[in-house]
Amino acid sequence: MSQFNDFRDPRAASKVLKRITELADGQPHRKFMEICGGHTHSIYRHGLEELLPQNVELVHGPGCPVCVIPMGRIDDAIHIANQPNVTFCCFGDMLRVPGGKSNLLEARARGADIRVVYSPMDVLTIAEREPERDVVFLAVGFETTTPSTAVTVLEAKRRKLSNYFVMSNHIRIIPAIKAILDSKDLDLDGFIGPGHVGTVIGNHPYAFVASDYEKPLVTAGFEPLDILESVMRLLAQKADGRCEVENQYTRAVRDAGNPVAIDVIDKVFTVRPHFEWRGLGSIEHSALMFRDEFAEFDAERRYAVPGVQIADPKACQCGEVLRGAIRPWECKVFGTACTPETPIGTCMVSSEGACAAYYNYGRFNKSPRIPVTAV
Amino acid sequence: MGHDAVDRERLHARIEEWRRRPMRLHDEVITSAHGAGGKASQALLNSVVFPAFEMTGAAMDGAVLQVTAKHDLVMTTDSFVVTPRQFPGGSIASLAVNGTVNDLAVMGATPRWLSVAFVLEEGLPIDEFRDTVAEIALAATEAGVRVVTGDTKVVGRGAADGLYVTTTGIGIRQDGIKLGPGEVQPGDVVLVSGNIGDHGIAVIQARGELDLVSDVRSDCAALHTLVGDLLASGAEVRWMRDPTRGGVASSMNELAMDAELGVRLREENLPVSRTVNGVCELLGLDPLYVANEGKLLAVVSPETADKALTALKHHELGRNSAVIGVVTSENSGIVVLETLFGGTRVVDMLVGDPLPRIC
């Protein structure tokens, strides 16, 4: 079967699962949060949750950059997209994220020139090809995607492009993890650390999780075996009474990260005093904005965005889901008023959102398996 | 955890109740999601189109018109707006013929007659129009159908994107062929006639927006002889579909909902080429949702599954056929996938539109 690779080897998995079961045996109920949405998606896509022992629970954290975008920011994005002569570019996931009244998909249907791109470099190409248009990129993501946005800005400066702009929604993982660790309803035994962010910032910045907050963290890769091995390591730490920051994803993450990528981010961006997170509220120093030297590329400075803060809908419990205080299906509107086709909260929009992942992949009775005849 | 399991069961029941309600249309304007063949498309049809004509969802692929006691006529229609109009393995012309021929074939009919209607945008090169018509004629000959009538309209520049084609097909169905979700029973076996996702990926690559180069070709083909071989094999065929927009996942969901049964697929058995898999991994797509234009999904009785598989594999278009799942009495209305890794997950209807204008 072509989908097969070493990190999806069911035989290796059964060995790791056996070890997990041994380690979990006799331990109290353990709740580990995977911070990154990529992990959430992989966990559901491969059906990992049901393979774990009953007393090991995975909680889905705030690491889906789409899910934490507040409604006011979407309204700002629509405002920019509706300006005359603007070509507005974003990733496909962003189209259906609900704003206060509408979303980008509907704005496009009503006439805004909104294009889906797969890479920020595509936006630069559009700007070069269509010099008469003002081309705006809706940049989202943690430190994983920030370097590529920064590179396009440096490149635009080098090519002297005057029609390329970026609306930066780049966010930082460490303040978000701190906000979760500081929340009053925190009830977690450890973290599966975000591997993709780790490739950029390294494993060292996570050290405070163990030293200051006494929670273990294992930075993990995204294949099913990576995730299982990380769960195994977290359980082993608990069994040994250790509390450390480990790196399971050594094939991609170094302690010091990627200095070139970090340098590129620093060149272009600086820390925002505050940024509003969906469900988590305003978090200090949790996002990035343009340095003054690059103000000419800042879409927010070019287009006076309304910047109106819109409270999350009352029924929506995205915040509690993002903090791991409740599980997706414990939200009052999960699966009824809030579904992937009519999302109330952002967690239901992106396939990496905890609610959408559970709704799409986890919602059925796990009765005994009926074997499919292999012919 | 026992308490939790009861809660979850109650929750699943509540969600299923919501899912069974006819999908409601909340939108004020048409968006690309309404054309994706998923939930938004269904909501649009259910609330705007079907009530006006007193149709049901069963008429989506084609209608059976009773003419004589021995034969039924089957009629279907489809519009084609694919961009780009040429792609490896096919074109808007071959799609327009094969798409309609396949809709007739999977209803058990022998395709006979086609009508072809064009909407042309001012400025379209006549040479391209001439080539398109010639290709349609060739594809029709190959599929054994005659183009018997048609229409041509021209709209101003910007009012259409080059060229759109609508084809309507009529076929003849022998009396006694019983196909449909009502015929499907728990224990029945699901087969697919080869690698899935080739068409969608070929079209996306042909757009040249992604710096990806591969040898994926559209599987665009007329399925009537493959269907003929399957029906003649003696296999008890209960249901057939060609999984186009929305892919195998959407067709399987329609089956589960219409039959009020569950479907359990096994990832290990799904035929997907390495290249399509790789492109899907890169783009965050799931091959189960990517369109096909020359694949057959069939549900057959468990006793005749071997016979059906052999018949499909003997046909040129079915060499890579596989048994991909079973119909179950549990999880009614839901498609479940046993993952390669030993877990299970739900495969839902498509919501958004990851790959617009692929047919």
Image (cartoon, coloured by chain):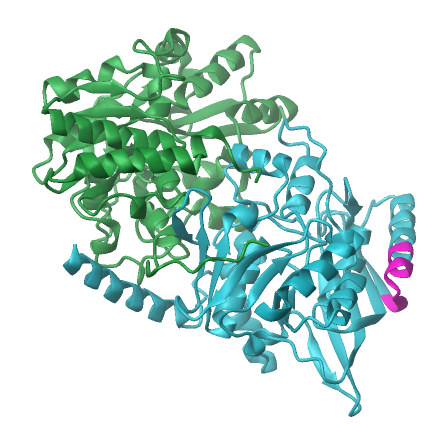
Q: Is residue A52 above or below residue A171?
A: below
Q: Residue at x 65, y 24 (%)?
A: A129
Q: Residue at x 58, y 29 (%)?
A: A133
Q: Which chain is cyan?
A: B
**Magenta segment range?**
B138-150
Q: Residue at x 42, y 17 (%)?
A: A147
Q: Which chain is green?
A: A
Can residue A82 be spotted in the picture?
no
Q: Quadrant of residue B198?
A: top right
Q: Is residue B55 left or right of residue A73?
A: right
Q: Is residue B163 left or right of residue A321?
A: right
Q: Is residue B260 above or below residue A35?
A: below
Q: Quadrant of residue A212?
A: top left
Q: Position of residue A66 (x, y in %)?
A: 36, 38
Q: Position of residue A110 (x, y in %)?
A: 52, 50
The quadrant the N terminus of chain B occupies is: bottom left
